[in-house]
Amino acid sequence: MRDERDRLYWIEGDVPHAPAPDQGPDPWGETKVVGTKRPRVDGYERVSGTAVYPSDLTLPHMLYGAILRCPHAHARVNGVNTTAAEKMPGVRAVLSGFTPDDAATAPHSGFIRTRLFNPECRYEGETVAAVAAETPYQAWDAVRAIRADYEVLPFVSDERRALDADAPKVQDEGNQVGDTQHYGRGDIEAGFAEADVILEQTYRTECEIHTPMEPHGCVTRWDGDALTVWESTQGVYNIQNTVAASLGMPLSKVRVIGHYMGGGFGAKLQPGRYTLIASLLAKRTARPVKLVLTREETCLAVGNRPPSNMWLKAGVKRDGTLTAFEYVGSGASGAYRAGGVSLLDWQVRDLYTCPNVRTELTNIYINAGPARPFRAPGHPQCSWALEQTMDALAEAIGMDPVELRLKNIPTFSQARDGRPYTTTGLRECLEEGAKAFGWSEARAATAADGDGHIKRGVGMAGALWGYGAGGPPCTVFVKVFADGSVNLNMGASDIGTGTKTVMAMVVAEELGVDPNSVQIDHADTGTTAYATASGGSKTVPTESPTVRSAALDAKRQILALAAEELEVDAASLTLENGKVVPADDTSQAKALSELRSLRRRRMITGVGHRGPNPADKVTCPFAAQFCEVEVNTKTGEVKVLRFVAAHDSGRVMNRLTYQNQVFGGITMGIGLGMTEERVLDGDQTGKMVNKNWHDYKLPTALDVPADMTCVPIDVPDPEANIAGAKGIGEPATIPTAAALANAIYDATGVRITETPASPLKVIQALTDAGKGA
Amino acid sequence: MLPQFSYVRATSLDEALQHLGTDDARLCAGGSDLIGCLRDEVFECSKVVSLSGIEQLKGIDRIGHAGVRIGALTSIAEVASDPLVNRGFTALAQAAAAVASPQLRNQGTIGGNICQKPRCWYYRGEFHCLRKGGTTCYALAGENHFHAVLGGARCYFVHPSDTAPALIALGASARVTGSQGTRLVPMEEFYVPPSTDPQRETVLEPDELVSEITLPAPAPGLRSSYRKVRARGSWDFSLAGVALALQFDGDRVVAGRVVLSGAAPIPWRSAEAEAAITGQRLDETTARGAAEAAMQDAVALKRNGYKILLFKGVIEEELLKLTQV
């Protein structure tokens, strides 16, 4: 399917590859470094505070930017009076839609463009004016002094009401974004006709905010007609592309640097209007400008996981054969065209074998900040619906929920023309996860729960992430210096997942050096080759084969030089601990620094390009998670006792960073399932009432169980790429919330169909069902 | 970003009180509530008067044979871990331990905790609500998930303090010091309900502050506890909480107080629940009866009906737990 994801994550078509197709290296057999537990190569810098994030950066003569944002859900800006603000101490520039600098446009999704300071503000937090001043306090004092004349307009903040005939229009075209998307295969009526049990249920998941630790922001500096942007981003080339296009500049004149960054989860795949505003402020003042958003601004204006409304009807035979899925979903795009229903039906389409499927998705405008990709767009929401339905189907036919899933494991992608998967680890995830959890014993134990008002329950859910294969284009350089030390040069960002560490391990594996000794230059459009953004769980499967290719290219060159100098066959040489070692006589090992030819050349440069994915196959990660909860039926409090997460993401590159992703994914899934919810003041103002970290409830350390177990299904996928790895970041959070809901059902007999399963919802649901104590 | 203000670090109570009399001056004890209010521009403030240099406001001492005096500037963390508090006043120790997060308990003070400004997302947000001098309580017709089911009148926030309900249950008093001298105010009479004045939370005059809290010696047979249900495990205010201080004679409750958090704009003493258990043997039937009685006058708003269910559950659960102490 083609949508925003393809554009953001990779590009199809002809690309260079090295090695040439069909001449690639053999898959790794036994590895020495790859697959071990390695602490982060930049762990000390991150923990000690010496790592410089964009929000830490201070340049000489730097100014601070601040933005006046529309306080209304929908308003027309009839004028902006900046006279007082311009005269305030320290103020160096003020921009608004009524000053001449508003030439730049700000693409929202590539489909449409809006003015930087739109005269019609369609969501709370839309940009109205901006200031650059000597200190952040002066900048904000000036923002407070700007007088904007707002004409407040009617709004709609709930996508469930936005298609009503009398709903205020968010965009002139009306409140539906494009046409309803339809998908179908098989014969849905025949499917239901052959079912022994048919169940249907509506579900809803609430809107989540990305809430990265480091807010969105940048520092911008002009040098003549060239612009440098230090941005907290997942992909420097995405930022370069949008900034250059918006400001009408050649790509070569826009350099974007994104070394350290404090989390993104999809919200930092693209720049914000703030990036362009900072660039214009810097141009106007001829000074560098830092513009970092406040926490409140990040809640309003730089993306969210949209709320999802889902209805699922499912048919199954008594023997567990699925016969039909019918699914209707809708979601909120926000005030501009964005992925309100991106991939919202993918789990239903493709996770389990089912010949007859019909889905329908409707994307809806509301007066709220536009959605952005959020860790596995659409998938955790769809999982919330599908996996609870699977649980209910299993109960209805008297089958164990794991057994029902095992009966319906696909070996090919039904939604992608039946192309086979390179590997399908779903069975192993289900079986090994269930074994590690003690599923059967735990089910028996919770079924025999006593009369107390504290009830125990266990639940599980399967998942697949529809992407996670990675792909071209990507180019990487590995430089070996005359003394044998190694530099890795790649465009990819390390968004906190351990990309740098994994790639240093790949270099170490091939060149026989210590991973910690590999110096890494990355995420800089001025100095590195092109890389797609780190998103879609594709960084490891994109970058690690590319880095391997580059390292192998350097190795081949070094061994050729050494073979000539040592007068032996290159094939008999290996690299170990910075030495060239002849296989038949290790005593003749020679340090790289002693190779005369290398000393003369001063540097060997290995180049690697990401090769294409197999043409007729599909590569996806799979997962199954299991959990146990305790529910207080007097208060609706749910305590998560333990989680077991079994994941097939191909080869495990670094067991520590892998486990980190899994535990982080579970934590985030607990947030979706149990605590997080954007609340808009829908009946009065449309404003977000919980745009801070107290009222918007992220899970804390006490909401996440200490007892979490990661069960990697460590089976390399050699067909997928020459590293054998698939993505792990997103699958890790897909099944979590649904597994929790199933555990709550097992404990109480009550289904929580709307997130979050907080005491507010659970006590009400228990009481409504007559199951409260 | 904080608006401008001047800053004074007082070295004596007298100095602090002098500054307090000037325009728009605000006290800063631990600052964990004040800084948020300033950042959110909840009220005007031209001068911040820090109390952190006044040593006499810190520390916990015994008074009489078993009473306790707690300086207003004592941190919540110290209250939670103090042996004297833990020995005789379990409800207060548990309430202090339930406050916010470890960082905030280290920074926040007991005096600041009982003098917190309302935790209502309209009051704290960009809404000119009744309590801020406007004409409307936005919570009444708005997103009132976390608002009052008891004691609301024109304004419907719930008092955010965990320690205040415990202090009221334990019969504590606040020593209020002003330029005119000091007075001792029973904690039960410290709070002003919105029916009396929707723009005032406590009886403190603008030139007064809380200098210490005194707890009388526990009565014989006193058992106390505090628990709150919250939407997440840490850094969260009470959805429904209850402080109990019951005097037992055998398995019979001879006297006691039941004070709710998260229920009303003031810590809510439930005379109905107390009447239902006083003179009774505390068992499942009386506990359930007391929980029902506590909620008999509760009125749900559009989104907080769950609170009535929650209170019934947590009151019953906590009453029964006290029988097992």
Image (cartoon, coloured by chain):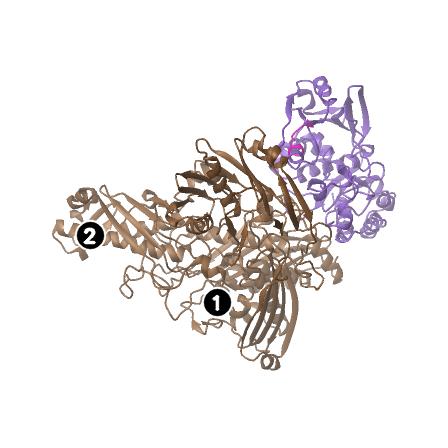
Chain colours: A brown, B purple
Q: Position of residue A350 (x, y in %)?
A: 51, 69
Q: Nearer the viewer, residue A424 or A686?
A: A686
The residue wearing badge 2 is: A559
Which image quadrant for residue A332?
bottom right
Residue kind at label 2, given as amino acid type: Leu
Q: Is residue A542 among what the camera can see?
A: yes
Give the structural element (helix, strand or loop) at label 2: helix
Horizontal arrangement in the rendering, residue A531 relative to residue A342 (left or right): left
Q: Position of residue B273 (x, y in %)?
A: 84, 45
The quarter in which the C terminus of chain A is drawn is bottom right
The answer for how far apart the CA atoms under marks 1 and 2 are is 44 Å
Label 2 crowd bin: few (<14), some (14–19), many (20+), radius 10 Å: many
User: Is A586 rendered above or below residue A1?
Assistant: above
Q: Which residues are magenta?
A: B27-35
The residue wearing badge 1 is: A1
In magenta segment, residue B33: yes
Horizontal arrangement in the rendering, residue B271 relative to residue A550 (left or right): right
In magenta segment, residue A174: no
Comparing labels 1 and 2, the label whose residue is closer to the camera: 1
Give the structural element (helix, strand or loop) at label 1: loop
Residue at (61% x, 62% y) in the render: A173
